[in-house]
Amino acid sequence: MNSELPKTLDDVVRSFAAMPGIGKRTALRLALAQLKRPASEIHRFAAALINLADNIQYCSSCHNISDTDICYICSDVKRDKSLICVVEDIRDIIAIENTGQYHGLYHVLGGIISPVEGIGPSQLNMDSLLQKVTSTEVKEIIMALNATMEGDTTVFYLYKKLKSYPVRVSTIARGVAIGSELENADEATLGRSIANRQPYENSFSS
C-alpha cells in the first residue's frame, strides 16, 4: 500500500482498504485513528471481529445471519408465521425492521437472478422457500426486492413457481423509487410501501 508506512500499520491499512466503499485515504485515516485508542479498546475490536468470523451462522429456517441455528425473528412466538417477506439480503431485513410496521417472518434469497454476474436460480435460496409453502401454513409471500431489472426478473421467476400453491403473492408498493435499494429508503416510505403492498398480478400490463 505505502512503502513509507511501518509494516504493522500498512497491514491494517490494507485490511481496511479491502472493505467495500473504503478507499486508500479513508483506510489510512481509520488505521491512524486506531493508534489514538487505548490498547484495551483495540483488543475488544479485534476480539469482536474474530468472534464474528468464528461464530456467526445462517438461520436454518430463513437464512438470516444469527448467533444460533434459528434466528431471533424466526424464534419469536409473537411474529405472524402466515406472512413471509422475501428479501435479497440481511441489509433489507434491517431496513424493514426499522420501520416497525412488519411483524411476519422473512426469507433471505442471498442475492437476485443476474445472468450478467452468472447468478441463476439454483444459486439462490429458492428451494427452501418453496418447501416452506408446502410444509407450513403460509398465506402470503411478500416480494420486497429492489426495483431493478434483476429484482423484477427474480420476482417474476418466483411468482411462476408459487402460483400453483394456495398462497397470495404480493409486492411492496412502488413508493420505493425504481432502481433504488431498500436499505437506502427512508423508514416512512418503506413502511408505507409494505403497508400498501399489492397483489403481484396487478403489476401486469392489461
Image (spheres, rainbow, N blue to C red):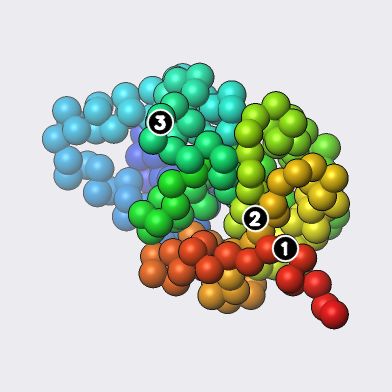
Cα–Cα gap, marks 3 and 1: 28 Å
Task: Point out which mark residue 143 bears.
Answer: 2
Q: Residue at x 85, y 45 (%)?
A: 164
Q: Which amino acid, by three-letter code, is at mark 1?
A: Tyr
Q: Is residue 37 left or right of residue 80?
A: left
Task: Tell me which label, 3 or 1, sits earlier in the chain.
Answer: 3
Q: Position of residue 131 (x, y in %)?
A: 74, 30
Find disc 1 in the rendering and name its residue.
Answer: 200
Q: Which amino acid, by three-letter code, is at mark 3?
A: Asp
Task: Name the quadrant containing residue 40.
Answer: top left
Cα–Cα gap, marks 1 and 2: 9 Å
Task: Name the quadrant containing residue 165.
Answer: top right
Contact (Cβ within 8 Å) of mark 1 with mark 2: yes
Contact (Cβ within 8 Å) of mark 3 with mark 1: no
Asked whether residue 150 appears in the rendered view, the answer is no
Q: From the image, which quarter does the C terminus lie in? A: bottom right
Task: Tell me which label, 3 or 2, sits earlier in the chain.
Answer: 3
Q: Position of residue 73 (x, y in %)?
A: 44, 35
Asked whether residue 102 appears in the rendered view, the answer is yes
Task: Point out which mark residue 76 bears.
Answer: 3
- Mark 3, secondary structure of its residue: loop
- Mark 2, secondary structure of its residue: strand
Q: Residue at x 39, y 65 (%)?
A: 187
The front one of 167 and 109 is 167
